[in-house]
Image (cartoon, rainbow, N blue to C red):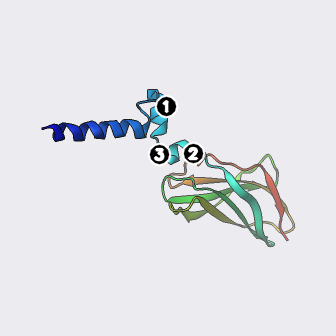
Amino acid sequence: MTRLLLIPTVTVALTLITTGSFFLSPQAAAQATSSPEQTSRVHITKGPALESAHDDWAIVTWTSNNPGGSDEHFGVVHYGTEPKNLSQTAKSHVRLNPGHSYTVFRVRIDGLKPKTTYYYTVDSVNANSASDGVTSPVKTFMTE
C-alpha cells in the first residue's frame, strides 16, 4: 500500500520541480512550460543578401534561427522600385528541419527589369501564411 501512494507523490513532486510550478507564479509557470516556438523570438542571423542578379531575375538569401511550428514554411521577399512601395512579392518553399537550430532561406525573384534598382525586405511565413515575426530592414540590389 505504501508503494502505491509513493509513486503518485513522487510523480507530482517531479512535475512541480521540473515545470517550475512549485516555485513560480501561474503565469511564469505557463511561460516556463511553453514550447520553444511560443517563447523564442525568430531573428535573422545572416543576411539578407543578394546571392545573384541577372537582367530579369535575382536570388536573395538569408539565415534565421529555426522558426519552429509547421515544417512547411516559405521565405518571402517584398520588393519594388521605390523603398516605400514594396508591393511585389516573391516566395519560395522550404521544409524546416527540427533538428537544426537555423534555417537558410533562398528566394528567386523573376520578371525584373534590366539595369533597375530594387528595394526589398524579407520575411518568413508558415504554411498558413502567418508571419514568423521577422522582417529585415530595407535593402537594395540592381539587376544587370
Q: Residues within 10 Å of mark 2 (few under 14, many from 20)?
A: few
Image quadrant occupied by the N terminus: top left
Tag 3's secondary structure? loop
Whichever of callouts 2 and 1 sits on the residue coming sooner in the sequence is 1
The residue shown at (60%, 59%) is 102
The residue shown at (62%, 59%) is 75
The circle drawn on residue 28 is: 1
Whichever of callouts 1 and 3 sits on the residue coming sooner in the sequence is 1
* Residue 111 pos. (x, y %): 73, 67
Image-quadrant location for residue 16 = top left
Q: Residue furthest front?
A: 2
Tag 1's secondary structure? helix
* Residue 98 pos. (x, y %): 50, 60
* Residue 69 pos. (x, y %): 49, 52
Q: Which residue is mark 3?
A: 35
Camera-nearest label, 1 or 3:
1
Image quadrant occupied by the C terminus: bottom right
Q: Which residue is mark 2?
A: 40
Q: Residue furthest right?
A: 115
| Kind of residue indicated by mark 2 | Ser
Image-quadrant location for residue 61 = bottom right
| Kind of residue indicated by mark 3 | Ser
Q: Is residue 113 above or below residue 119?
A: below
Q: Is residue 57 above or below residue 7?
A: below
Decide which of 102, 11 is in the foreground and name it.
Answer: 11
